[in-house]
Image (cartoon, rainbow, N blue to C red):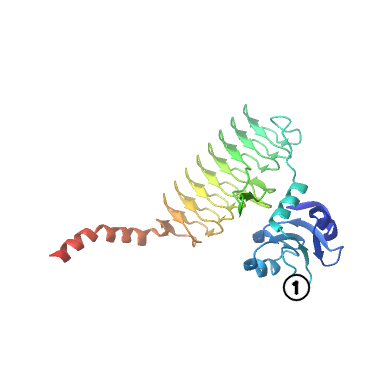
Amino acid sequence: MKFPKVYTIKEIAAIIDCDFVGDENFPVHGMNEIHVVEPGDIVFVDHPKYYDKALQSAATIVLINKEVDCPEGKALLISDDPFRDFNKLTKHFQPFKAAGAAIASTAKIGEGTVIQPNVVVGENVTIGKNCLIYSNVVIYDNAVIGDSVIIHAGTVLGADAFYYKKRPEGFDQLLSGGRVVIKDNVGIGALCTIDRGVTGDTTIGEGSKIDNQVHIGHDTVIGKKCLIAAQTGIAGCVIIEDEVTIWGQVGTTSGITIGSKAVLLAQSGISKSLEGGKVYFGYPAEESREKLKQLAHIKRIPEILEKLKK
């Protein structure tokens, strides 16, 4: 998430009422999660296990719960609860606004686009030309939709990320201030849910087609001309490269990469990154020929046991 202007670290520290280390005029351009940070961004860390990763990341401002040695060229925000204060910044720069109309006055809708009854379009949404948005679709604030996109009934674009911190009193949600970005010529089926990024974008690449009842988690990036069949569940922060085919009821873990032109057969469980250009099956998913051989051997176990008894 980029801020509307460049702030100083002193100004940011005042917003969240915390101390800082570094030049009071140190520039702050935005805030992001660790996997998408750039110079000028704030990243937060609240566990010693991840201190080095955050301090050595591309982020130049680290929101941290311990005063440590500040790396050269960076600045620190010292907080007793970085998770809480990261949420404060999200609220400050992306505050929730109650809807005043089904289609917000700030929405921009391109020529030739058809929006059916009972669609909700949030603040600052951009929809391109010649799109077709069917009834009961909900498009949350700040989403960007390209040209010639079809979205079928009941789909929701931009719900919050499923991201929580466990507290003694329950689960504390990390607020989402990111967007959903849908590129040109994408088709999205009925009753799909595509969550917005926490601070960045959840992106569906040009020409990709998504079947009914598919869930795509926060900050996931899907490439061009992918096919995703019904009831697939893709976790957050996944990268799916171009021309990947995913058949029905596939599930993935978070933070992995599926290489271009990979094929994931139905009901596979993806627990790690997979190389492109191959066909995968099973849980944990392996190359389909090898997995099917294993299943064939398993079927022979009763026969082998009978022979051993004799």
- Left or right of residue 74, residue 212 in this image: left
How far from the left and from the top, in percent, is residue 34?
A: 66, 61
Q: Which is nearer the eye, 254 or 88?
A: 88
194 up-or-down from 307: above or below: above
84 up-or-down from 116: above or below: below
At a point 76% along the width and 36% down the height, the residue shown is 106
Quarter occupied by the C terminus: bottom left
How far from the left and from the top, in percent, is residue 86?
A: 72, 54
Instruction: Give the quarter of the image for residue 13.
Output: bottom right
Q: Which is nearer the eye, 266 or 301?
A: 301
Q: Label 1, on which residue? A: 69
- Residue at disc 1, secondary structure: loop
At a point 74% along the width and 51% down the height, the residue shown is 88
How far from the left and from the top, in percent, is residue 307?
A: 16, 64
Q: Is residue 113 visible?
A: no
Q: Amino acid type of disc 1?
A: Asp
How far from the left and from the top, in percent, is residue 26?
A: 84, 63
- Left or right of residue 9, residue 83 in this image: left
